[in-house]
Image: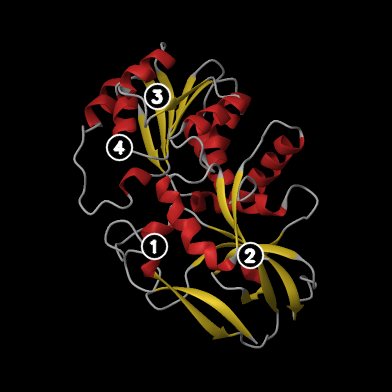
């Protein structure tokens, strides 16, 4: 049996292009004890994967040139040598960008098909939702009446952060890159939303939206937006540093205002985190997010691209702001 696979062809300098991906037909190995044959249903494309295309030291090993790219995949068991995973079971795991994968049963997690749309286990009820849950509730710990700012608020993580902050009773401000995304954030219950691409003075817009200052900042973006937020931090503000997508394709380290003095003067806490830091608490997060979703307290948006051959294009679209919410590719 053969499968299509997508490999890293070369390491990009600056913004990646389609030329950095290579399609290849590969042989699918026979199953051994406790293994399953998985048919890919949905593939997750995520900004953090850009870092893995480089060979710089990071919190996770880089992709290997000439090897399949690996990421979040939702798949169906079509053949099984594992007594716990029957044919027809749905699973999620960190798997190769392939139409078919062979995996050990312990390397994937079975998901229920009746709690939410199955693709949500790559989004709201998967890694992005858990990133929002732990980053906001464990690091920022917003209190009722406080002001929370979320950058990249229309992305898969940001839109969940804003809704969780509203559940906690906070005043929530989001930044996004289009009027359509701003309108959608208002639909989700954000108190204020700012189009950073058309706003001439982001600091002034934030000051107007947050007249009482900023208590919590969930940072997905970095850059000029973060510079403006740091100027308006309240005493003992908390910052969850989740992503820096504004710099992921930079070929030189940008020099901006240095935030240390502002953090010092406000006794603010700035904490970077990776969602895998909370791996032992993932069941807690999934349980709570599922409850809030079933109660109608959480909504979620996906940008779904169809076709295995469209995975690279969907990934590249992340850096052009083409997605609202979670970007996924429907393969089968």
* Front of the two marks 3 and 4: 4
Viewer can see residue 80: yes
Q: CA distance from mark 1 to mark 4?
A: 21 Å
Residue identified by numbered label 4: 223
Give how far across and how far down residue 124 sits, in percent.
62, 45
Residue for badge 1: 52
| Sequence-first tag of 2 and 4 | 4
Dot 2 falls on a residue whose secondary structure is loop
Residue sitting nearer the eye, 221 or 24: 24
Image vertical order of residue 318 relative to residue 267, above or below: below
Q: Mark 3 or mark 4: which comes first in sequence?
A: 4
**Do tag 1 and tag 3 residues touch (Cβ < 8 Å)?**
no
Q: Nearer the viewer, residue 283 or 80?
A: 80
Considering only order in the chain, which callout, 2 or 3, is on the residue closer to the N terminus? 3
The Cα–Cα distance between marks 3 and 2, rounded to whole angstroms, is 43 Å
Q: Quadrant of residue 111?
A: bottom right
Which residue is at a point 37% across and 69% down the rendered structure image? Answer: 19
Q: Residue 331 got which mark?
A: 2
């Amino acid at each position: 049996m053969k499968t299509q696979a997508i490999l890293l062809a070369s390491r990009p300098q600056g913004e990646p292009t389609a030329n950095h991906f290579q399609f290849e037909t590969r042989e699918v190995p026979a199953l051994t004890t406790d293994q399953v044959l998985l048919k890919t249903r949905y593939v997750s494309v995520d900004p953090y994967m850009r870092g893995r295309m480089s060979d710089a030291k990071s919190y996770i090993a880089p992709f290997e040139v000439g090897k399949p790219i690996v990421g979040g995949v939702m798949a169906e068991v079509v053949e099984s040598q594992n007594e716990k995973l029957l044919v027809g079971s749905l699973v999620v795991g960190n798997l190769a960008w392939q139409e078919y994968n062979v995996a050990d049963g312990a390397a994937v997690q079975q998901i229920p098909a009746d709690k939410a749309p199955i693709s949500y286990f790559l989004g709201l009820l998967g890694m992005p939702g858990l990133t929002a849950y732990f980053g906001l509730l464990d690091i920022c710990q917003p209190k009722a009446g406080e002001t929370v700012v979320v950058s990249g608020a229309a992305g898969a993580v940001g839109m969940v952060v804003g809704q969780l902050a509203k559940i906690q009773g906070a005043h929530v401000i989001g930044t996004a890159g289009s009027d359509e995304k701003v309108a959608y954030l208002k639909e989700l219950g954000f108190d204020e939303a700012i189009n950073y691409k058309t706003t001439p003075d982001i600091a002034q817009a934030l000051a107007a939206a947050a007249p009482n200052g900023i208590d919590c900042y969930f940072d997905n973006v970095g850059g000029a937006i973060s510079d403006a937020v740091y100027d308006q931090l309240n005493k003992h503000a908390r910052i969850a540093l989740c992503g820096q997508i504004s710099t992921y394709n930079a070929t030189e380290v940008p020099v901006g205002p240095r935030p240390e003095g502002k953090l010092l003067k406000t006794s603010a806490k700035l904490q970077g985190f990776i969602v895998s830091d909370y791996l032992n608490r993932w069941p807690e997060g999934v349980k709570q997010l599922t409850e809030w979703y079933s109660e109608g307290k959480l909504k979620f948006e996906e940008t779904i691209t169809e076709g295995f051959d469209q995975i690279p294009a969907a990934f590249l679209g992340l850096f052009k702001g083409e997605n609202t919410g979670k970007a996924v590719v429907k393969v089968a």
